Amino acid sequence: MRHLDFVLPDDFNLFHIGDNHLGNSMMYERGYMMALNALDSEWGGLPASRNVAVHVGDIHEGIYMDDYRFDPGVHDAEKDMYWMVDASENMHRPYAKKFLVWMDGNHSNTRKLRPLGNSTYEHAKRVGGEFGTYQAVLTFKTVHGTVMFRNFVGHGWGSISSKVKPGKRAKANREISLMMKLAAKASNCMLMCMGHTHQLEVYTPHQELYMRHVGGGKIIQGYTNPEKYYGDVDYIPDELRYYANTGSFLKLYRPVKYDEDRKHSSGYAEMAGYDPVALGFTVTEVRNGRIQAVRKIVVDEHQGFIILSN
């Protein structure tokens, strides 16, 4: 766990990008490069200079031939950890100043890799930016030193899923599951984020009506509101925070013609029977020190960016 402070302007865009799994042939490299290029582009009416990013982990695949998930059509046994670090350094060097933090992931911190070191730590040391470990709390401050809000980031754990119908109910179940998985990790973070599941989900604050009885027999209505919980606070109610499961860039399938490829090419997601997921990332749009929206962004090399509704 790390606690990291960053001084930023009152208006900025915070990208959470991760789970690209460099070294896996199922990585959607074109889509990932679209996300990186977005860091150097105008977003939400702000210039590129106002874009910053957190990598949420699993930057490297980190799978070797003695791992049960190893597949010769997907992984290359001759490409070791330091090849992956070299490749990620070259890929991210042009965008290095945008990344505030590089979070660790379960793929880059396995028992098989530990004797060689930590590939995410090695990447951060070369490229710049903070190594976040597996969980971190990021405090965003104004140029005057006052706290805007805090962001909990963890690479993630377990799964987020629901199979019920109708689809809206399943979506609500996934969002609630995400909230329950993260809420207790940090009591005073307005934005709670994790990767790992490869799901792209966002829970936004739920405001409820309340009735307040005051003097003179008057009754005044109001709504719970996250506004009062910005700044350097001790506690934010669970349902008044933002939660994000930050997506991925690992494809479920890689269609090939067997006669041409001559390799069995089923990734472990396919073999485990996982359902398809939207490939993409999230952008938290901050204006005047307040979160205005957390956008779910799907990448598609043919259609560009697709913004999903919450």
Image (cartoon, grey):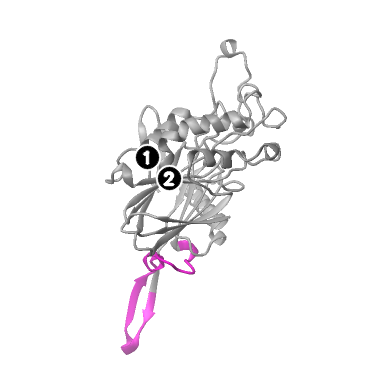
Q: Percent x, y for residue 158?
A: 62, 47
In the foreground, 55 or 86: 86
Q: Quadrant of residue 210?
A: bottom left
Residue assigned mark 2: 53
Residue sitting at x 34%, y 63%: 144
The residue tagged with tag 1: helix, strand or loop? loop
Q: Give the range drawn in magenta.
A: 211-239
Label drawn at residue 291: none
* Magenta-drawn stretch contains 238: yes
What residue would you read off at disc 1? 39
Residue 258 is left or right of residue 32, and the answer is right
Residue 207 spot, x, y in % from top left: 40, 64
Residue 309 x %, y %: 38, 46
Q: Can residue 22 be seen in this view?
A: no
Do labels 1 and 2 touch, CB within 8 Å?
A: yes
- Residue 304's image quarter? top left
